[in-house]
Image (cartoon, rainbow, N blue to C red):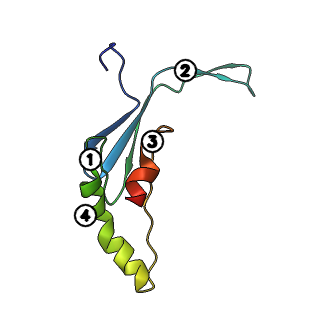
Amino acid sequence: GEDGTKPCLATPDPEAVTVRDPAPAEDKAGGGKRRRGGERSYRYNRVLGPEASQEDVYRLVRPLVLSTVKGYNATVFAYGHTGSGKTHTMAG
């Protein structure tokens, strides 16, 4: 970020999300420190980063919505901070 911090999520390619855990945390059960820092990557069929517009989202999920009308199942996972516009984007 502008303040020198790194974001905790990155979208390195259209099918991956990288989660960064910047600091160790207390391990309450063991009474000591548990090393958590580092990165983990997760793969999905498609990932849209924070720069994606509502139109981008619409183009991606439209076929999924149409398939549900035909009786198929579909899942759209939206992640973000409270107030970041997830519901507004999904509701259009």
Helix, strand or loop for disc 1: loop
Disc 3 to disc 2, C-alpha distance: 23 Å
Q: CA distance from mark 1 to mark 2?
A: 32 Å
Q: Is residue 20 visible?
A: yes
Residue displayed at 29% across by 53% down: 54
The residue tagged 2 is: 24
Alpha carbons under labels 4 and 3: distance apart: 20 Å
* Residue on which disc 4 sits: 59
Could you say where residue 82 lies in the image, as x and y percent from the top left? 51, 38
Q: Nearer the viewer, mark 1 or mark 2?
A: 1
- Residue type pointed to by label 1: Ala
Type of residue at label 3?
Gly
Residue at the spot of label 3: 80
Q: Could you say which is closer to the camera, residue 54 or residue 60?
A: 54
Distance between the Cα atoms at labels 1 and 4?
A: 11 Å
Residues at circles 4 and 3 in contact by the CB criterion of under 8 Å: no
Image height of 4 relative to 72, above or below: above
User: Which quadrant would residue 29 be assigned to in this image?
Assistant: top right
| Residue nearest the observer in this picture, 78 or 6 | 78
What residue would you read off at disc 1? Answer: 52
Residue that extends furthest to the top in the rendered view of this protein: 3
Mark 3, Cα crowd under 10 Å, few <14 / some 14-19 / many 20+, is few
Relative image position of residue 67 (x, y in whole percent)? 37, 79
